[in-house]
Amino acid sequence: MPSDWDEIKRLAADFQKVQLSSTLQRLSERNCIEVVSLLVEKGLLEIIYTNDGKEYLTPDQLSTEIQDELYVNGGRVNLTDVSRTLNVDLNKVTAAANKITHRDKDIHLILGQLVNEDYLQRVALEINEKLIQSGEISAGSLAEQYDLPADFILQKIIERNLGKTIHGKRDPSDPKVFFTQTYISRCKAKIRGALAALSRPTPISSILGQCKLKEKIFYSLIDDVSFDGSVTSKMSGAQYIPNVYKKAQNEWVTNLFKQNGYVQHDTLSHFGISDAKTFIQRQLPNEELVHLEKCTVGKRFVEQLDAAIEECISSGSYLDVTTILPTDLSQGDIDKLFETVMKPTTSRNVLILDTTIFTNVFLDRLVLPVKEIVEGNVKKAIESGKYQQYLAEKLTSGRQTGLQETTGDSKADRREERRRKAAVGKGGGGTQGRETKTKSTKKHYRGGAGEKGGFDSDSDDNGKVSKKKTAASIDLITLKEIIEVVETSLNKLNNEELCYLAKDVALHFYPQFSKEALHTAQQVYEASLQNSTQNRRQTHAALQEKLNNLLGDVRLYEKGLKVS
């Protein structure tokens, strides 16, 4: 700097001396132009014209003036501004700037700008001040602030001055980030204090917002901070779960299970436990557990349900299991519990409908009046002739079915006989007979429209006959009658709340009562036939005796007439 200032003073003195001196021999402007042009033509001089063509200067002078502009602008200048200030074409200025950078390693051309080492040192001092204030700084933010490439700032400013002008450390996880040790210590203290104050699961994003930390810094320092808890992951949406919360959670689940004998999964989901079954199994490793869809039950709860069912069977009553089961169990859970509790001997003595277990004794009481209705319906059917009509239709159906089967067999035999004769006739006789091969043909079923006299047509006709004849049936007891009896019995027993299951009970007993009604009708009908036959025999004997008496009287009358 002092030498430059001395040079400026010397040039100013020379300029003043030239201005004060007087000369007798002067060249005109035109003569000067001609002299310069002659030197340029002979290659003795290289000049650069200004944009308006009124002035020209040498390349060395252009380089000097560019460096002067760089100095005047504080060590950083845009070549566009230099071109405008010197009134020289931008291409000439750029070419001269390139020569300057090759000649002087302390001057750099970057993004159309010239910067020198003085400017870079000043920027390094500013970066150090910013780093001290914020504790952390990145090359990206500096590039945006100084309008310079991040790599240029990183290589030419930060790395050259790190540990000297810039007092900081590089982030091991991100080479473009730098921080101070004081900043790291301050961040650790914030993290440690925030985690120690928490007593329930908290999103990491909330902790970062409270501590005003970046997520990357938090996760890079979390392993170096001693805390009483755990972080679920190092991804977005992670949570911090304190150990005190886990302890309270485990104690709550254990106490709940000991008190009720089961743990509902929805309750655990409110505590942030997604896999409830695995958590319960890990928390209660020594318990015999049954995992259901909605809850997990223990051995004591299963034994309690088993005892309630046994008591229900012994008392001959019913049991609504919803009164002892958790309220939010699904039907699938209840069915699985039944499978666990029910034994083969127990299953034979009960009927399970929906969530209610009925004992056979209780059901028999419900449907006992049905037998009276069956007897009444059987008597009416026999007296009205409906049962006799049913027997006739059933007998006719059986005969036609047997006849159809016999006809089908006969047709098949005749068809087979014709095939056998045709094969013998085509083969000829003797050793000279030519052997022929018969190609078997397969007849395809065509939905009831087969060939005339064909097997498929016969089969279809048989099927139609069978369907028509098996349609003979008689209803000696209806489902509606059974439902009404069950509902009436439930009302009499003060169990109106079970009336919604009356139809299910009736469906269960309907096949049984239908079969019993047919059996009863058969017995009553046979008994009536026997009574009718016996009555006819007695009437016939009385009539025969009366006729014999009348015949004897006639003969006596005849003899009397002959005597007279």
Image (tube, rainbow, N blue to C red):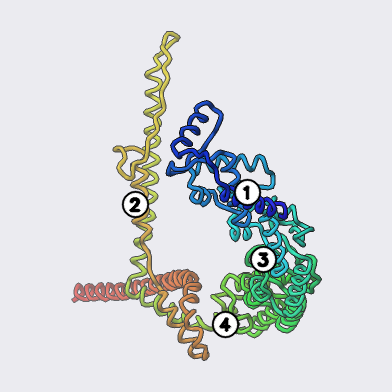
Identified by mark 2, the residue type is: Val
Q: Position of residue 358 (x, y in %)?
A: 58, 79
The amino acid marked with disc number 1 is Asp
In terms of secondary structure, where does tag 3 sit?
helix
Q: Is residue 269 or residue 554 the one in the foreground?
A: 269
- The residue indicated by pointer 1 is 14
Query: What amino acid type should be assigned to the residue bearing mark 3?
Result: Glu
- Residue wearing tag 2: 465
Choose mark 2 or mark 3, whichever is in front: 3
- The image quadrant of residue 248 is bottom right
How far apart are the alpha carbons under marks 2 and 4? 44 Å
For the residues bearing labels 2 and 4, Cβ distance under 8 angstroms: no
Residue 257 showing in the rendered view: no
Side of 426 where 207 appears, left or right: right
- Provide the residue designation for mark 4: 362
* Relative horizontal placement of residue 431, taking residue 71 as reference (left or right): left
Q: Earlier in the sequence, mark 2 or mark 4?
A: 4
